[in-house]
Image (cartoon, rainbow, N blue to C red):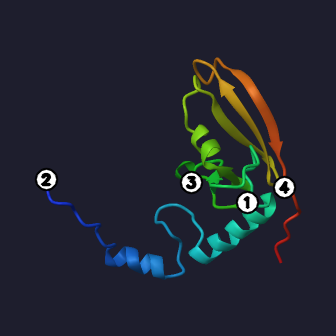
């Protein structure tokens, strides 16, 4: 079988991107962000807060941090804006309301309200389920 085009190799990052990656400066340009070392600490505190489980469905496998307010919309890399979600719940944060969207709202001091909204649009919907996300343990930063 003959290929129509040769496979392209993955491009190496440019010099400026390598310098940003290797320095202790923020990881992105144009919006506030934490350094790689600060992100590692933030991730550790987030895992400690929820004991490594999804904060909605309590699953242990395939969990990742999720920004409640997206960084592109001005959200910060802070514990008050991060929740730990499994891949299934993370996917539900961006699906159509007709399917059932998982909506997470900050309440304050690392507490969040989550609900699954189902309906033809975000203005005309019904709440399917809802709950609170509270820290399992008190995280103390020294």
Whole-Å distance between the Cαs marked 1 and 2?
Answer: 48 Å
45 w.r.t. 116: above or below: below
Horizontal side of residue 96 vs 130, given as left or right: left
Secondary structure under badge 4?
Answer: loop
Front position among marks 3 and 2: 2
Q: Secondary structure at mark 1?
A: helix
Q: Which is closer to the viewer, label 2 or label 4?
A: 2
Q: Residues within 10 Å of mark 2 (few under 14, many from 20)?
A: few
The residue that label 3 is drawn on is: 71
Q: Of the numbered discs in the image, which one, if any, rests on residue 3?
A: 2
Q: Earlier in the sequence, mark 2 or mark 4?
A: 2
In the visual, does 125 lie left or right of 55?
left
Apparent side of residue 9 relative to residue 22 in the rendered image (left or right): left
Q: Is residue 90 left or right of residue 79?
A: left
Neighbour class for label 1 at 10 Å: few (<14), some, many (≥20)? some
The residue mark sitting in front, 1 or 4, is 4
Circle 3 SS class: helix
The CA distance from mark 4 to mark 3 is: 22 Å
The residue carrying mark 1 is 79
Q: Position of residue 59 (x, y in %)?
A: 72, 50
Query: Where does residue 133 sit, x and y in percent of width and height?
Result: 81, 46
The image quadrant of residue 89 is: top right
Residue farthest along the front direction in this orientation: 1
Q: Which mark is residue 106?
A: none
As displayed, is residue 90 above or below residue 16?
above
Cβ–Cβ under 8 Å for marks 1 and 2:
no
Closer to the chain start, of discs 1 and 2, is: 2
State if disc 3 and disc 4 touch (CB < 8 Å).
no
């Amino acid at each position: 079988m003959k290929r129509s085009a040769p496979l392209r190799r993955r491009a190496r990052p440019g010099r400026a991107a390598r310098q940003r990656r290797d320095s202790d400066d923020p990881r992105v340009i144009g919006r506030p962000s934490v350094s790689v070392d600060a992100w590692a600490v933030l991730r550790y505190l987030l895992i400690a807060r929820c004991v490594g489980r999804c904060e909605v469905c309590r699953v242990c496998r395939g969990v990742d941090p999720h920004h409640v307010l997206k960084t592109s919309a001005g959200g910060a890399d802070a514990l008050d804006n991060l929740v730990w979600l499994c891949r299934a719940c993370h996917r539900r944060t961006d699906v159509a309301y007709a399917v059932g969207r998982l909506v997470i709202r900050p309440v304050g001091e690392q507490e969040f309200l989550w609900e699954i909204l189902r309906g033809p649009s975000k203005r005309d919907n019904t709440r399917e389920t809802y709950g609170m996300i509270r820290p399992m343990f008190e995280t103390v930063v020294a």
